[in-house]
Image (spheres, grey):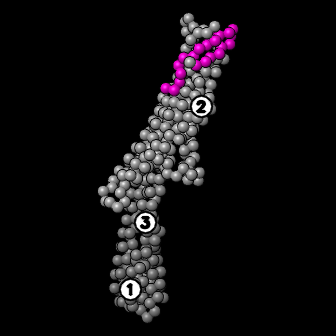
Amino acid sequence: MSEVASANGPSTGMAHVSSYATAGFNRISWGAVFAGVVLALAVQFLLNLLGLGVGLAVLEPAGSDNPEAGSFSIAGGIWFIGAGIIASFAGGYVAGRLSGRPSGNTGAYHGLTVWAAATLVVLYLLTTSVGMLVGGAFQGLSSVIGGAGQAASAVAMAAAPAVANASDPFGAIERQIREASGGTDPEALRSAAVSAVRAAMTADEASAEDARDRAADSLARAQNIPLDQARTQVQQYEESYRATVAEIQQQAARAADVAADTLSTAAIAGFLSLSIGAIAASLGGMAGTKKSIVVDAVGSAARGTEY
Protein backbone atom coordinates (compact mmCIF):
# COMPACT_ATOMS: atom_id res chain seq x y z
CA MET A 1 0.00 0.00 0.00
CA SER A 2 1.40 3.40 -0.95
CA GLU A 3 0.11 6.65 0.43
CA VAL A 4 1.46 10.19 0.70
CA ALA A 5 2.37 11.00 4.28
CA SER A 6 3.69 14.08 6.04
CA ALA A 7 7.28 13.94 7.27
CA ASN A 8 6.34 15.66 10.51
CA GLY A 9 4.12 12.83 11.70
CA PRO A 10 1.06 10.76 10.84
CA SER A 11 -2.28 12.44 10.15
CA THR A 12 -5.87 11.33 9.64
CA GLY A 13 -6.37 9.25 6.52
CA MET A 14 -2.65 8.57 6.09
CA ALA A 15 -0.50 5.52 6.72
CA HIS A 16 1.10 5.21 10.10
CA VAL A 17 4.86 5.86 10.04
CA SER A 18 6.72 3.68 12.52
CA SER A 19 9.25 5.01 15.03
CA TYR A 20 11.99 3.31 13.05
CA ALA A 21 11.09 5.29 9.96
CA THR A 22 10.85 8.50 11.99
CA ALA A 23 14.32 7.91 13.43
CA GLY A 24 15.64 7.28 9.92
CA PHE A 25 14.08 10.49 8.63
CA ASN A 26 15.75 12.52 11.43
CA ARG A 27 19.17 10.84 11.39
CA ILE A 28 22.05 13.05 10.31
CA SER A 29 23.68 12.39 6.96
CA TRP A 30 27.40 13.09 7.29
CA GLY A 31 27.88 12.70 3.57
CA ALA A 32 25.43 15.55 2.99
CA VAL A 33 27.15 17.63 5.68
CA PHE A 34 30.54 17.04 4.07
CA ALA A 35 29.17 18.07 0.67
CA GLY A 36 27.69 21.21 2.21
CA VAL A 37 30.97 22.14 3.91
CA VAL A 38 32.93 21.68 0.68
CA LEU A 39 30.45 23.81 -1.25
CA ALA A 40 30.34 26.51 1.44
CA LEU A 41 34.13 26.79 1.51
CA ALA A 42 34.33 26.83 -2.28
CA VAL A 43 31.67 29.54 -2.58
CA GLN A 44 33.32 31.67 0.07
CA PHE A 45 36.70 31.19 -1.60
CA LEU A 46 35.33 32.27 -4.98
CA LEU A 47 33.44 35.26 -3.60
CA ASN A 48 36.52 36.43 -1.69
CA LEU A 49 38.59 36.14 -4.84
CA LEU A 50 35.97 38.21 -6.64
CA GLY A 51 36.08 40.80 -3.86
CA LEU A 52 39.87 40.88 -4.01
CA GLY A 53 39.73 41.41 -7.75
CA VAL A 54 37.19 44.22 -7.44
CA GLY A 55 39.21 45.88 -4.70
CA LEU A 56 42.44 45.76 -6.68
CA ALA A 57 40.64 47.11 -9.73
CA VAL A 58 39.51 50.14 -7.73
CA LEU A 59 43.04 50.98 -6.62
CA GLU A 60 45.24 53.11 -8.87
CA PRO A 61 48.87 52.81 -7.75
CA ALA A 62 49.95 55.65 -10.04
CA GLY A 63 47.12 57.94 -9.04
CA SER A 64 46.12 59.79 -5.90
CA ASP A 65 42.36 59.31 -6.18
CA ASN A 66 42.22 56.13 -4.09
CA PRO A 67 39.85 55.21 -1.25
CA GLU A 68 41.08 55.79 2.27
CA ALA A 69 42.53 52.78 4.06
CA GLY A 70 39.76 52.85 6.68
CA SER A 71 36.99 52.91 4.08
CA PHE A 72 38.68 50.18 2.10
CA SER A 73 38.93 47.96 5.19
CA ILE A 74 35.27 48.52 6.10
CA ALA A 75 34.16 47.69 2.56
CA GLY A 76 36.31 44.55 2.61
CA GLY A 77 34.82 43.46 5.93
CA ILE A 78 31.25 44.00 4.68
CA TRP A 79 32.03 42.05 1.52
CA PHE A 80 33.44 39.17 3.52
CA ILE A 81 30.45 39.06 5.84
CA GLY A 82 28.10 38.98 2.84
CA ALA A 83 30.19 36.25 1.22
CA GLY A 84 30.06 34.21 4.40
CA ILE A 85 26.28 34.52 4.62
CA ILE A 86 25.83 33.45 0.98
CA ALA A 87 28.26 30.56 1.38
CA SER A 88 26.55 29.41 4.58
CA PHE A 89 23.12 29.46 2.93
CA ALA A 90 24.40 27.57 -0.12
CA GLY A 91 26.14 24.93 1.99
CA GLY A 92 23.10 24.49 4.20
CA TYR A 93 20.80 24.21 1.20
CA VAL A 94 22.92 21.48 -0.40
CA ALA A 95 23.20 19.56 2.87
CA GLY A 96 19.45 19.75 3.42
CA ARG A 97 18.70 18.56 -0.11
CA LEU A 98 21.27 15.74 -0.19
CA SER A 99 20.41 14.49 3.29
CA GLY A 100 17.18 12.95 1.93
CA ARG A 101 15.40 13.87 5.14
CA PRO A 102 11.88 15.25 4.61
CA SER A 103 11.76 17.17 7.91
CA GLY A 104 12.40 20.88 7.66
CA ASN A 105 13.82 20.92 11.19
CA THR A 106 16.25 18.12 10.33
CA GLY A 107 17.31 20.05 7.24
CA ALA A 108 17.92 23.11 9.39
CA TYR A 109 20.10 21.06 11.73
CA HIS A 110 22.06 19.78 8.76
CA GLY A 111 22.62 23.37 7.64
CA LEU A 112 23.69 24.41 11.14
CA THR A 113 26.15 21.51 11.29
CA VAL A 114 27.59 22.59 7.93
CA TRP A 115 28.08 26.11 9.27
CA ALA A 116 29.82 24.85 12.42
CA ALA A 117 32.14 22.52 10.51
CA ALA A 118 33.00 25.15 7.88
CA THR A 119 33.74 27.72 10.60
CA LEU A 120 36.11 25.33 12.34
CA VAL A 121 37.85 24.57 9.04
CA VAL A 122 38.33 28.26 8.27
CA LEU A 123 39.64 28.94 11.77
CA TYR A 124 42.09 26.09 11.31
CA LEU A 125 43.26 27.56 8.01
CA LEU A 126 43.73 30.96 9.64
CA THR A 127 45.69 29.70 12.63
CA THR A 128 48.06 27.23 10.94
CA SER A 129 50.54 27.25 8.09
CA VAL A 130 48.00 25.40 5.97
CA GLY A 131 46.26 28.74 5.53
CA MET A 132 49.15 29.89 3.36
CA LEU A 133 47.93 27.49 0.67
CA VAL A 134 44.76 29.51 0.18
CA GLY A 135 46.56 32.85 0.18
CA GLY A 136 44.40 35.85 0.95
CA ALA A 137 41.08 34.25 0.14
CA PHE A 138 40.21 33.72 3.80
CA GLN A 139 42.25 36.58 5.21
CA GLY A 140 39.18 38.81 5.37
CA LEU A 141 37.87 36.60 8.14
CA SER A 142 40.60 37.89 10.41
CA SER A 143 38.83 41.27 10.38
CA VAL A 144 35.61 39.59 11.51
CA ILE A 145 36.25 36.38 13.45
CA GLY A 146 39.93 36.90 14.09
CA GLY A 147 39.66 40.66 14.25
CA ALA A 148 40.68 40.62 17.88
CA GLY A 149 44.06 39.17 17.00
CA GLN A 150 44.75 41.71 14.30
CA ALA A 151 43.49 44.54 16.47
CA ALA A 152 45.79 43.54 19.28
CA SER A 153 48.70 43.33 16.87
CA ALA A 154 47.93 46.75 15.41
CA VAL A 155 47.65 48.31 18.85
CA ALA A 156 50.92 46.71 19.89
CA MET A 157 52.67 48.14 16.82
CA ALA A 158 51.19 51.58 17.46
CA ALA A 159 52.31 51.45 21.07
CA ALA A 160 55.79 50.15 20.23
CA PRO A 161 57.46 53.60 20.44
CA ALA A 162 55.93 54.16 23.85
CA VAL A 163 57.11 50.75 25.03
CA ALA A 164 60.60 51.48 23.74
CA ASN A 165 60.69 54.80 25.57
CA ALA A 166 59.26 53.18 28.68
CA SER A 167 62.21 50.79 28.76
CA ASP A 168 64.65 53.75 28.76
CA PRO A 169 63.08 57.19 29.25
CA PHE A 170 66.60 58.42 30.08
CA GLY A 171 67.76 58.02 26.46
CA ALA A 172 67.28 61.64 25.39
CA ILE A 173 69.06 62.95 28.47
CA GLU A 174 71.99 60.62 27.89
CA ARG A 175 72.38 61.90 24.33
CA GLN A 176 72.47 65.49 25.56
CA ILE A 177 75.20 64.68 28.09
CA ARG A 178 77.37 62.79 25.61
CA GLU A 179 77.02 65.49 22.95
CA ALA A 180 78.18 68.23 25.30
CA SER A 181 81.82 69.34 24.96
CA GLY A 182 84.42 70.00 27.63
CA GLY A 183 86.67 68.11 30.06
CA THR A 184 90.13 66.65 29.64
CA ASP A 185 88.97 63.07 29.00
CA PRO A 186 85.55 63.51 27.34
CA GLU A 187 84.59 59.86 26.88
CA ALA A 188 85.40 58.65 30.38
CA LEU A 189 84.01 61.75 32.08
CA ARG A 190 80.84 61.71 30.02
CA SER A 191 80.24 58.05 30.82
CA ALA A 192 80.69 58.78 34.51
CA ALA A 193 78.35 61.77 34.24
CA VAL A 194 75.74 59.67 32.47
CA SER A 195 75.88 57.03 35.21
CA ALA A 196 75.68 59.64 37.96
CA VAL A 197 72.76 61.51 36.40
CA ARG A 198 70.91 58.24 35.74
CA ALA A 199 71.37 57.29 39.39
CA ALA A 200 69.98 60.69 40.42
CA MET A 201 66.92 60.25 38.22
CA THR A 202 66.07 56.83 39.67
CA ALA A 203 67.11 57.35 43.29
CA ASP A 204 64.59 57.09 46.11
CA GLU A 205 63.67 60.04 48.28
CA ALA A 206 66.14 59.15 51.02
CA SER A 207 69.21 59.21 48.78
CA ALA A 208 67.94 61.61 46.10
CA GLU A 209 69.82 64.69 47.39
CA ASP A 210 73.17 62.91 47.62
CA ALA A 211 72.62 61.45 44.16
CA ARG A 212 71.93 64.92 42.76
CA ASP A 213 75.14 66.27 44.31
CA ARG A 214 77.20 63.45 42.80
CA ALA A 215 75.51 63.95 39.45
CA ALA A 216 76.22 67.69 39.48
CA ASP A 217 79.86 67.10 40.40
CA SER A 218 80.34 64.53 37.62
CA LEU A 219 78.56 66.75 35.11
CA ALA A 220 80.69 69.78 36.06
CA ARG A 221 83.91 67.82 35.53
CA ALA A 222 82.67 66.23 32.29
CA GLN A 223 81.61 69.52 30.70
CA ASN A 224 84.11 71.79 32.51
CA ILE A 225 81.37 74.06 33.84
CA PRO A 226 80.71 75.64 37.26
CA LEU A 227 79.09 73.43 39.88
CA ASP A 228 76.05 75.73 40.19
CA GLN A 229 75.45 75.49 36.46
CA ALA A 230 75.78 71.71 36.67
CA ARG A 231 73.22 71.63 39.49
CA THR A 232 70.81 73.62 37.31
CA GLN A 233 71.31 71.18 34.46
CA VAL A 234 70.68 68.20 36.74
CA GLN A 235 67.45 69.83 37.89
CA GLN A 236 66.39 70.39 34.27
CA TYR A 237 67.26 66.81 33.40
CA GLU A 238 65.18 65.58 36.33
CA GLU A 239 62.18 67.66 35.24
CA SER A 240 62.54 66.40 31.69
CA TYR A 241 62.83 62.81 32.93
CA ARG A 242 59.70 63.04 35.05
CA ALA A 243 57.76 64.66 32.20
CA THR A 244 58.83 61.88 29.85
CA VAL A 245 57.77 59.20 32.32
CA ALA A 246 54.38 60.89 32.79
CA GLU A 247 53.87 61.12 29.01
CA ILE A 248 54.74 57.45 28.60
CA GLN A 249 52.23 56.51 31.26
CA GLN A 250 49.54 58.54 29.48
CA GLN A 251 50.41 56.90 26.15
CA ALA A 252 50.21 53.48 27.74
CA ALA A 253 46.80 54.30 29.24
CA ARG A 254 45.51 55.57 25.88
CA ALA A 255 46.87 52.49 24.12
CA ALA A 256 45.11 50.26 26.66
CA ASP A 257 41.82 52.10 26.09
CA VAL A 258 42.16 51.81 22.32
CA ALA A 259 43.02 48.13 22.61
CA ALA A 260 40.01 47.44 24.82
CA ASP A 261 37.62 49.31 22.52
CA THR A 262 39.04 47.70 19.38
CA LEU A 263 38.96 44.19 20.80
CA SER A 264 35.43 44.69 22.08
CA THR A 265 34.21 45.95 18.69
CA ALA A 266 35.96 43.13 16.85
CA ALA A 267 34.55 40.49 19.18
CA ILE A 268 30.99 41.81 18.86
CA ALA A 269 31.32 42.07 15.07
CA GLY A 270 32.63 38.51 14.92
CA PHE A 271 29.78 37.25 17.09
CA LEU A 272 27.15 38.99 14.97
CA SER A 273 28.63 37.84 11.65
CA LEU A 274 28.90 34.24 12.83
CA SER A 275 25.38 34.30 14.24
CA ILE A 276 23.98 35.60 10.95
CA GLY A 277 25.94 32.90 9.11
CA ALA A 278 24.46 30.23 11.39
CA ILE A 279 20.94 31.52 10.74
CA ALA A 280 21.58 31.61 6.99
CA ALA A 281 22.88 28.02 7.03
CA SER A 282 19.84 26.84 8.98
CA LEU A 283 17.46 28.58 6.60
CA GLY A 284 19.36 27.11 3.66
CA GLY A 285 19.06 23.61 5.09
CA MET A 286 15.36 24.12 5.68
CA ALA A 287 14.84 25.49 2.17
CA GLY A 288 16.67 22.53 0.63
CA THR A 289 14.50 19.96 2.38
CA LYS A 290 11.85 18.08 0.39
CA LYS A 291 8.63 18.13 2.36
CA SER A 292 6.76 15.09 1.02
CA ILE A 293 7.46 11.35 0.87
CA VAL A 294 5.71 8.24 -0.39
CA VAL A 295 5.36 5.63 2.34
CA ASP A 296 4.96 1.93 1.62
CA ALA A 297 3.59 0.51 4.84
CA VAL A 298 3.95 -3.23 5.43
CA GLY A 299 3.05 -4.35 8.96
CA SER A 300 5.06 -2.32 11.42
CA ALA A 301 7.80 -1.39 8.95
CA ALA A 302 7.81 1.58 6.60
CA ARG A 303 9.92 2.53 3.63
CA GLY A 304 10.03 6.11 2.36
CA THR A 305 11.02 7.55 -0.99
CA GLU A 306 11.08 11.18 -2.09
CA TYR A 307 9.32 12.49 -5.15
- Eyeballing the image, is 84 above or below 226? above
Q: How far is the residue under mark 2 from the one under mark 1?
A: 78 Å
According to the image, label 3 marks what residue? Answer: 161
User: Callout 2: few (<14), some (14-19), or many (20+) C-alpha neighbours within 10 Å?
Assistant: many
Q: Is residue 145 visible?
A: no
Name the residue type under label 1.
Ala
Q: Is residue 36 left or right of residue 193?
A: right
Q: How far is the residue under mark 3 from the one under mark 1?
A: 26 Å
Question: In the image, residue 64 lies at what x, y percent?
Answer: 31, 59
**Is residue 286 within the magenta segment?**
no
According to the image, label 1 marks what residue? Answer: 180
According to the image, label 2 marks what residue? Answer: 32
Q: Nearer the viewer, residue 275 or 107?
A: 107
Q: Nearer the viewer, residue 109 or 245?
A: 109
Residue 23 figure quarter: top right
Q: Residue at x 68, y 13 (%)?
A: 301
Chain part drawn in magenta: 287-306
- Eyeballing the image, is 51 above or below 14? below
Q: Residue at x 44, y 86 (%)?
A: 190
Name the residue type under label 2.
Ala
Residue 100, numbered label:
none
Nearer-N-terminus badge (3/1) = 3
